Image: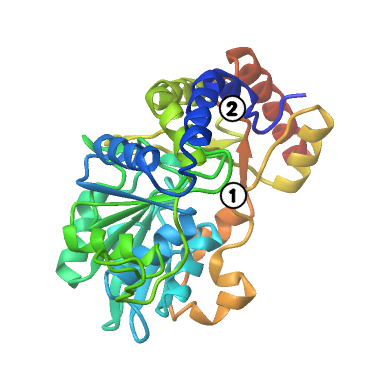
Amino acid sequence: MIPFLDLGPTTAEIMPDVVDGWKEVLRTNRFVGGPLVERFEQEWAQYCGTTHAIGVANGTDALHLALRALGLGPGDEVVLPTNTFVATAEAVVLAGATPRFADVDPDTLLLTSDTLRAAATPATRAVVVVHLYGQMADMEALGRTAAELDIALIEDAAQAQGARWRDVRAGAWGIVGCFSFYPGKNLGAFGDAGAVVTSDDDVAERVRSMRDHGRSFDGWYQHERFGVNSRLDALQAVVLSAKLPRLDGWNARRRSLVDRYRHAIDPDAVQLVAVAPEAEAIHHLAVARVDNRDQVREALSARGIGTGIHYPTPCHRIPPYAGFRGDGALPVSEAAADRIISLPLHPHMTTAQVERVAAELNQVAERVAAA
């Protein structure tokens, strides 16, 4: 069996560091916040190239709090790609704003300057650029368009820890960047965790307050804004600090494995999602497109190969969000949703496993297509 994801090797690799860190948590009894959380926040800000990193409970909260910290709410529209995990749209609704769904590039499946323009209206106040599958969108073009439209540029970098567009890492292009550290991410905790990064001092202060019940920094029982309970646990910060020094190496291994996929897969039967020349992808997922996707997945499963779908339903087709579609067509996202398949990928996967997956996939895809 070749599983779609195997977290065991990465967990084993960092276990000694985690055990030492957790002993420190148990010794100090600083379970929420405290010096270990502050250490990771400093490490993550430095890694991303931003002034601030604020740990929160999960990636959805990171997006929700970032939107609110920018003053977005009722009456404001926020453009986002429709082919994303529902949390991106969910965060917009939680902030009281209105999602407006956009289509994506047919090769990279990422938001573009043109699709942003097509979706924007006079009520648009922000765009959430989703760096899907671990590859960054064209942040230079999107930045110019956002500036022309006079809207805030927000990065949903939940799948892009360490990715770059040219020489700038994910999270450092927009006014704010939002990360998830869900266990399966390239930098994953042992449970839910997230972070907001920014170089705007005012935004950072508002997020820090709102993640902690809207507290004022002048007193424990002084609350100056509406907040939530979304603080990063020290136990998770220890895990993230243990993994962070290894992240670039793990990402490099993912790139190597996807390159192997790209050389071994038959492009006439299977099309891997393209990578822009200016992007340094970290390949959170290895995503391809095939005809008769469900039959292909069933055949691969019968041969002992696990796969996934990210994501089977565009957000504008999910019932609670159907009313936010707007008046634009979304043909690329709709067509891709029926064909995308996520292949096995993790940094401790072997080249032989990739070769086997590719060989089986070529056979299955060609057989299904001929049937």
Residue drawn 49% across the image and 77% down it: 325
| Quadrant occupied by the N terminus | top right
Residue drawn 35% across the image and 44% down it: 136
The residue at which mark 2 appears reads as 266
Q: Position of residue 138 (x, y in %)?
A: 28, 48
Q: Which of these two is toward me, 362 or 119?
A: 119
Relative to 295, is 124 on the left or the right? left
Give the secondary structure at mark 2: loop
Q: Residue furthest right?
A: 302
Relative to 130, is 197 on the left or the right? left
Q: Residues within 10 Å of mark 2 (few under 14, many from 20)?
A: some
Q: Position of residue 208 (x, y in %)?
A: 32, 59
The amino acid marked with disc number 2 is Asp
The amino acid marked with disc number 1 is His
Q: Which mark is residue 310?
A: 1
Give the secondary structure at mark 1: loop
| Up-down relation of residue 355 to residue 5 (above or below) | above
| Up-down relation of residue 352 to residue 98 (above or below) | above
Q: Residue furthest bottom?
A: 75
Of the numbered discs 2 and 1, the one sitting upstream in the chain is 2
Q: Position of residue 148 (x, y in %)?
A: 15, 68
Give the spatial CA distance, label 2 vs label 1. Answer: 21 Å
| Quadrant occupied by the C terminus | top right
Image-quadrant location for residue 295 = top right
Q: Residues within 10 Å of mark 1 (few under 14, many from 20)?
A: some
Residue drawn 28% across the image and 39% down it: 42
